[in-house]
Image (cartoon, helix red, strand yellow):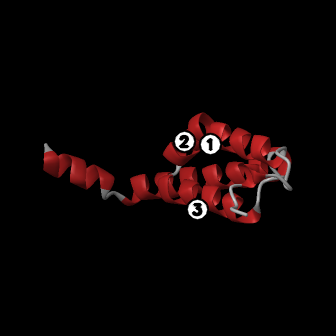
Amino acid sequence: MIEMIRQFLGSPVVLGIWITVVVACVLWTLRDLRQNNAHLPTLMQWVWVLTVAYSGPLGVARLLFLGIRIIWLVCERERWPTNSTHNGLAG
């Protein structure tokens, strides 16, 4: 059974399909970040792109279900006054 799974996952066809899905996921992520989340810092955008490139559709699911909350928190934090102690800096 394990050998059948190894052969299936090691198949060039499965690898080609996985690469195609990952590329589509990365392209979707880039489009989404540029159109809907352009306000995010560049580093955060790159982190999401690399996360999706590494994990494919699982990374997109993570972006959709967890990332939206993180993005929302960043947006809320940007609305905080920068000249108060809310920015987390001492002094």
Judge left or right: residue 57 versus residue 5. Answer: right
Which-is-in-front pick, marks 2 and 1?
Answer: 1
Q: Secondary structure at mark 3?
A: helix
Q: Nearer the viewer, residue 50 or 68?
A: 68
Q: Nearer the viewer, residue 54 or 41?
A: 41
The residue that mark 1 highlights is 67
- Residue farthest to the top? 65
Around disc 2, counting alpha carbons within 10 Å, would you say few (fewer than 14), some (14 to 19), or many (20 or more)? some
Q: Position of residue 72 (x, y in %)?
A: 72, 39
The residue that mark 2 highlights is 62
Marks 3 and 1 sit apart, C-alpha to C-alpha, by 13 Å
Q: Nearer the viewer, residue 4 or 68?
A: 68
The amino acid type found where label 3 is placed reads Leu
The amino acid type found where label 2 is placed reads Arg
Where the N terminus falls, by quadrant? top left
The residue that mark 3 highlights is 50
Q: Secondary structure at mark 1?
A: helix
